[in-house]
Each structure stands twice: as C-alpha cells, then as structure tokens.
Image (spheres, helix red, strand yellow):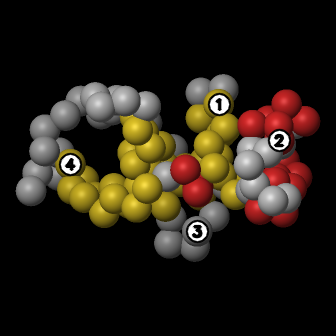
Amino acid sequence: MNTEITIKGNGHWRELIDGYDLTEVELAEFDYMDNPLDDFRGFRYKGDVYSLDQVMRYNKTINGKLYHGIYNFGFFSGLLINLDNGGDAVQVYYY
C-alpha cells in the first residue's frame, strides 16, 4: 500500500554514533540502558539524539520510497529512517 503524506528531508547520510560520542547531558537521556556508553547506537538529527532501540522496524513504501524504520512523535508526525546496507549510517526524514 502506498500512503501519501508530506515528507521532508534532504537524503543526506548521517553517521551512526556510539555512547562514547555523547555528552554527559545526552548520556543522561539514556540512563534506562544498563550501560549507555557501550549500549547506545544512534544518530543526531536537528539538535536531538535518537537511539536505534527507539526506532520501530517499518519496511513500508510511502510516496514510492521504501523506509526501514519509524520514530513517532505523535499520531501525525515523526521520523522515517533508512539504514544503509553496512549499518553505519541513516537517512532521516520528517513526516
């Protein structure tokens, strides 16, 4: 099924980061992890940090493009994620 929604993004690849790349304040956001330094894997987008464990697998085609993951802000907005084949970078789109 192809769903028509407004998607914004430039298609640039963002390198995934580890817990060692986070500031102390950012680490505190992920204190639910046993060891955020070792357990965190995620990305920065528009000043915020997202962990891949917060992204739900999606694998849906929207507006003719396949997306691998979704992070919902609410019912009508969130992020759509594409993971590169090597698992080292993501494309992030706002919907």
Q: Position of residue 66 (x, y in %)?
A: 28, 58
Frontmost residue, 54 versus 92: 54
N-terminal of the pair, mark 4 or mark 1, is 1
Q: Quadrant of residue 76?
A: top left
Q: Which mark is residue 27?
A: 2
Image: 7 above or below 83: above
* Mark nearer the viewer, 3 or 1: 1
Image: 82 above or below 43: below
Which three-letter amino acid code belongs to the residue tagged 3? Gly
Q: Residues within 10 Å of mark 4 (few under 14, many from 20)?
A: some
The residue at the point 82 percent across, 37 percent down is 28
Which three-letter amino acid code belongs to the residue tagged 1? Asp
* Mark nearer the viewer, 2 or 3: 2
Q: Residues within 10 Å of mark 3 (few under 14, many from 20)?
A: few
SS at badge 4: strand
Residue at the spot of label 1: 48
Q: Quadrant of residue 87?
A: bottom right
The residue at the point 43 percent across, 31 percent down is 73
Residue at the spot of label 4: 62
Are the residues at dot 3 and dot 1 in contact (C-beta closer than 8 Å)?
no
Q: Residues within 10 Å of mark 1 (few under 14, many from 20)?
A: few
Are the residues at dot 2 and dot 4 in contact (C-beta closer than 8 Å)?
no
Query: Can residue 59 be seen at all in this image of the molecule?
Result: yes
Cα–Cα gap, marks 4 and 1: 24 Å
Residue at the spot of label 3: 87
Cα–Cα gap, marks 2 and 3: 22 Å
Residue most extreme to the left? 1
N-terminal of the pair, mark 2 or mark 1, is 2
Cα–Cα gap, marks 2 and 4: 33 Å
Q: From the image, which quarter does the C terminus lie in?
A: top left
